[in-house]
Image (spheres, rainbow, N blue to C red):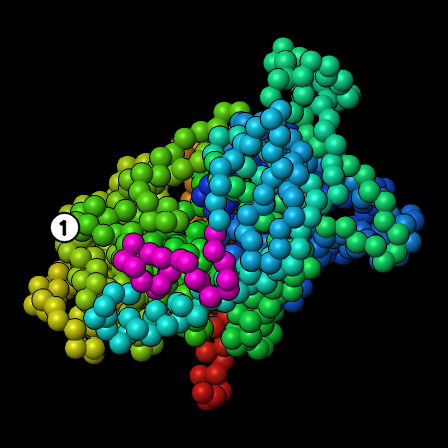
Amino acid sequence: MEDYALLADLHTGPLVSREGSIDWLCFPRFDSPAVFCALLGDEDNGRWKLSAVDGEVVSRRYVPDTFILETEWKTPTGRVLVTDFLPPSDDHADLVRRVECLEGTVEIEHDLRIRFDYGRITPWVRRVDLGSHSNGDDCAHMGDSPSEPHPVGTRHVPHDGDGAGETTSSGGEAGDGTQDGGTAAEGRTSHWYRNFRQRVRHAAHEARSGETDGKGLLAVAGPDALLLTGPQLEPYQLGRDGEDVEVEHGEAHGPGADIRVLEGLRRGHRGTFRLDAGEQLDWVLTWSESYRELLVPADPERAQRATHAFWTDWASAVDCDGEYHEVVKRSLLVLRALTHSETGGIVAAPTASLPEDFGGARNWDYRYTWLRDAALTITTLVQRGHEHGALLWRDWLLRAVAGNPDQLKILYGVDGRRNIIESELDHLSGYEDSRPVRIGNGAEDQYQADVAGEVMMALATLRDAGQEENDYSWGLQCNLMSFCELHMDTPDNGIWEMRGEPHFFTHGRVMMWTAFNEGLRAVREHGLAGDVERWTRLRDELHREIWEKGYDEELGIFTQTYDNREVDASLLQLPQTGFIAPDHPAMLRTVERIERDLQEEHGQLRRYRTAGGEQSMDGLSGDEYPFVICTFWLVEQYARSGRLDDAAELLRTTAGFASDLGLFSEQYDVARGRLAGNFPQAFSHLGLIRAVDALTAARHSETGRP
């Protein structure tokens, strides 16, 4: 998966292979069903490959500070540049592919196989006349005929660049999120949010200005429609032997096809196009709801300029210098890319079921918003001065967790929905035969004791940065502490979402302590109202309990759970909460045991010990690879406890495991030099940023620099 590049529009995150195949695309949102799913199966589960005939890729890169991907191909007769990107927009979903011949003559080959619903549905496909539409018209008016009924309804989306015509249920401005009588902090939040929404809308408007005239290829199935515009591709069908098959009975790709003839056929659209030096061709794939009128595709030239301006504008606010400035900036961009611009939900990764163990069963869907992952992401962004994204997430959080404290979930859909039901897709072979392929995530129903503390820390970071609380946000935090109180005697599944028996995980109990500690600090330092006596009692009870049951006096170390003597990489987070100093003797001995039991020969760290072919404590068989964020946590611990040389060496090694585009997955197979797990992973990228910041701060402290 290190060969894949991420594209981003703040709504979804397709992956493009080095060879030019888009093998994963969920339209219109991260957690929507995939329309290209070859990543988890084969090409007939959906892909869009664009490549140079007889060519090889000689370079690829992101245009600096963007997610515009440039791939250069070289052939015996010339060179060609392929540019792939998604224009940011809140009401359009486009994927743009541009091809420019740089030298000589080059033939470009397309293979497009649209498969809705994770490769389960082959759509009807037909050519459509888009008619002519100009600046300000967001709908493609198709030419109807009696013999070709219109597959979609009618819609006109006002789009004048400033949000005119957009409303919310409260009657305020779109995306405002405020009500009459809001606080000054709410006003500042909504002011930034309106400006951000305007930037997104402006980028979308700029991408669609101008004239469009021509034909398109329309694929329809169920609620989804995809429109391809650009030089036309031709339909084909292949038999089981891979040879072309002629279909005489009806149109093979649309209504009237003979199901007896089509059985077993692989169908798609393809085309070969010759370009001479200086010539350029563009294709745009646009998603729409099938029961509404098609939206006008982006104008490729304008869309590229608008996309470039959008990302570089955001990146210009990133303050990065030093040895790791490029990988830190890319990591911040990834965290931004994984944040949904409308809802504020932050996904753990844009992919599902990429394996933690190649060929094994440890395959999970990460296209949702975990409170923990999002909270740690927000803490990192705020510490880097990006408070605006944190405010958007705080609004998402208030909506998502609304209700009784005992109904708190550990993960939600991008829009805050619950009931993320886990299921298996038996028709998919899995990435490198890793099965089952899962969508949804059953961990939603787990109790994980650490979550409330991590959310409290994130909101405290935002508060310390000068953002005022409102009645709702502080009320939420009081509810989180009530949630902890309700579960004082409840074992949990831990930060790693173990699917075995629940335990009292030491890390989780420390995070519960943290929740109360941050609540008390909010009262003491920020003047917020709270039940100080009760929270103090509960915090102190947890403190005594952790030292009595989570600390092994004989070994002199903290343990993974209250009922075993194992260690766990999550224990490296204890100093980050203020529970214990990083150079406390008990912490240093715990680090020594973690190094002995969990660190492999190249310095990389596993989360915990697994049992190989037998069922482990986590309820699963098989192994996994070192966990990237755990190694970055160790870098932090080294830096904060005075082991600066060790921190620098381990950081240098681990940062080198990013792909050539600066992307990290969840885990890393050091022996084979391979990324593993879902990709790219927010956890890993925020871990790198924190590790760099910790080492930088330690060096400055050592030299006396501010």
Q: Is residue 6 above or below residue 394?
A: above
263 with respect to 121 (left or right): right
Whether residue 424 is visible here, answered yes or no, is yes
Span colored in magenta: 157-177
**Going by the image, does 233 lie left or right of 113?**
right
Q: Closer to the camera, 623 or 49?
A: 49
> What residue is rendered at 35% in x and 35% in y?
421
Please provide percent x and percent y for residue 303.
Answer: 63, 59
Furthest residue to the left? 533
Circle 1 packing at 10 Å, graded few (<14), some (14-19), many (20+), is few
Out of 595 and 678, give the one closest to the viewer.
678
Percent position of residue 575, x then y: 33, 67
Quarter of the image with the C terminus in it = bottom left
- Which residue corresponds to the image point at 18% horizontal and 54% vertical from the top-left? 484
Is residue 380 located in the magenta-colored stretch of the structure? no
Residue linked to disc 1: 486
| Magenta stretch secondary structure, dominant | loop
Residue name at image x 44 percent, y 51 percent: 348
**Quadrant location of the N terminus in the rendered image:** top right
| Residue in the image at 50% along x and 25% along y | 426
Say which element carries label 1.
helix
Percent of width and height locating residue 659: 63, 55
Q: Amino acid at mark 1?
A: Leu
**Which sits in the foreground, 237 or 369?**
237
Extreme residue toward the top, this view:
260
